[in-house]
Amino acid sequence: MPHQVATKPMSHRQILESMTGLMLSMFVAMLSSTVVSNALPRILHDLHGGESSYTWVVTATLLTSTASTPVWGKLADLISKKLLMQLAITVFIAASVVAGLSTSVGMLIACRALQGIGAGGIMAMTQIIMAALVSPRERGRYSGYLGVTFAVATIAGPLIGGVIVDTPWLGWRWCFYVGVPFAVAALVVLQKTLRLPTYRREVTVDYLGAALITGGVSVLLIWVSLAGQQFGWLSGGTAGLVTAGVMLLALAAVVEVRAREPIIPLALFRERTVTLATTAGLFVGLAMFGSTIFLAQYFQISRGESPTVSGLRTTPMILGLAVASLVTGRLVSRTGRWKRYLLVGSITSTVGFALLGTIDAHANFALIAVYMALVGIGLGMTTQNIVLSVQNTVPPQQLGAATATVSFFRSLGGAVGVSALGAVLAHQVSHSVLTGLAHLGVDPSQLGRSGTAIPDVTKLPAPVAAVVRAAYGHGVAHVFLIAAPLMLIAVAAVAAIKEVPLRRQSGTELNDQFERAGAAGEVSGAPVEHVATSS
């Protein structure tokens, strides 16, 4: 029997020191998305990409992040969490450097896909390491810090990206380079501050299950991305991709049921909280990623703002998210009650999305700011508590897989949302632009290669520019109108979750108890684990 290592509870200062590297890592992962969001119209204009390319540059990252998340989570239950985090950061650094050298849209999309693998690992491992360090009862206050980091990166990213794009001697390529120093700093800080026991089990990873899940999810996301643009929703292409995706996922389910260590343990879904929380996370991802990602197009194209100003315009939503996350986290830790905030937050976001569905190219910005703040406040109250509800339910040996499963479904929702709602936006804009130009008696070729290409509105004749601005205003509003009922489904799932008192022990402490119980023969059939301390 291996020597058992008893872990003493960490002090507040020790936790904060360990969290420094986690917050830097999360900042890097979020920055990779937000710093590019405002620059995408300019990037794709330079690389000659259209609306479908805009969607794919975002979707590629979400797709690989989604598909790889369950693998990161499963590995976290088997080997060093610290090592996995460092590996994820390294992958992210390499992809960022190459992305900055892109000479075509295809090359950029490939690099963004690799970035997604690294970013997915960073986001998943951050939540998993947090669960190992801090008990669910105390996690709220620390999750608030992560929420603020998320918000700072989301605010700083568009601003940094806007300044980079608007500065001639820098250019958009620096949007990919700017995160590299932060990523290197995160590696150094994690090496020095993170001390975490590692429980290594004598098992192997279910690579077949991982491959089938990744393949099935990827095929379905590719279908959602291309349907309605490259082929019809009811075409032979749709039938082929949907059939292939469903068959791969069905085979994955068969493999996962029989696997000794499944990538996504299907037994997790016997827990009511896990099933409902993952459902809520799926639709939160659909609404959140699927709509807010297009705000940059709204402000830059519909309202004619520069990338820098466009970033500033989204500040009300991000400040709402930051404040709500921090305040809610402290209230959860103080009271031990979490469902009320989850429910109120999801309802608030729904109202915010519905109100954003009423905007157009000439809407009063003060009202738009209020609507965005409602969305941000709701998401700040919701996203962290969905993960917390699951982590508080599952056994410590499945903490990594359970956390990654929640993240997987939220990312899956985001990828589907960006793809599907991006297709809706492209269709709406194309139809509106072509109709508007027909009324003016203007040839659509004035916009470039087609009515679906992302135009530089500043270079268009005034009447044509007005048509394009109106089209994007109504198109983005239509996307928000679709997001609102999606959030209503999340509200229903959240309302059905049963509130369970929060544990007062961290994942590491629970694992130690499991080890001692196993050594004493109190747990039958438990796998033998070797305990080591990562340094």
Image: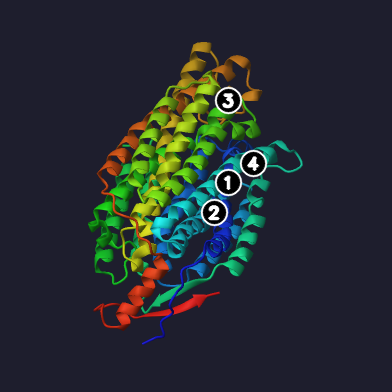
Residue in the foreground of this view, choosing between 376 and 406: 376
For disc 2, the marked residue is: 26
State whether residue 214 is above or below residue 463: below
Q: Nearer the viewer, mark 4 or mark 3?
A: 4
Rendering coords of residue 338 (x, y %): 36, 47
If you read the primary sequence from the N terminus, does the residue marked by circle 4 or circle 3 appear first? 4
Q: How far apart are marks 3 and 2 (CA)?
A: 39 Å
For disc 4, the marked residue is: 161
If you read the primary sequence from the N terminus, does the residue marked by circle 3 or circle 1 appear first? 1
Q: Is residue 99 left or right of residue 411?
A: right
Q: What residue type is labelled 4?
A: Gly
Rendering coords of residue 387 (x, y %): 38, 52
Which residue does the image show at 55% across and 18% down from the upper left? 443
Q: What residue type is labelled 1?
A: Ala
**Which part of the image, by quadrant, shows the N terminus?**
bottom left
Instruction: Find out whether the residues at labels 4 and 3 contact each other: C-beta distance under 8 Å.
Output: no
